[in-house]
Amino acid sequence: MTGSKLREIRALRGITQADLAAKAGISQTAIAEFEKDKRDLRTSTVAKLCSALGVKVTYTLDSP
């Protein structure tokens, strides 16, 4: 998952970085760094984010 894809999905869901962080059990700072591609996403983190966002992991791999 790219940072822009994460930001896009989060925005479409109307979820703030803070809300996503709380739902996924990840810090808001980490969410911001992921979205700016300043921090690499591990597979386990992608799974947590997808669960919190209500999307399948495969959806995050599709590039528009």
Image (cartoon, rainbow, N blue to C red):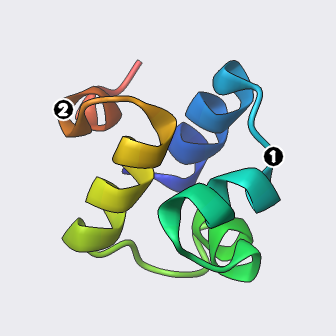
Q: In x, y percent, where is residue 4?
A: 60, 44
Q: Quadrant of the C terminus?
A: top left
The tally of labels here is 2
Q: Which residue is mark 2?
A: 58
Separation of residues labelled 2 and 1 (CA atoms): 22 Å
Q: Amino acid at mark 1?
A: Thr
Q: Determine the residue positioned at 56% across, 76% down.
A: 26
Residue 9 versus residue 43 in the image, above or below: above
Q: Determine the residue positioned at 79% across, 61% down.
A: 18
Res. 45 image quadrant: bottom left
Q: Amino acid at mark 2?
A: Thr
Residue 62 versus residue 40 in the image, above or below: above
Mark with earlier residue (2, 1): 1
Q: In x, y percent, where is residue 8?
A: 63, 31
Callout 1 secondary element: loop
The numbered disc on residue 16 is 1
Callout 2 secondary element: helix
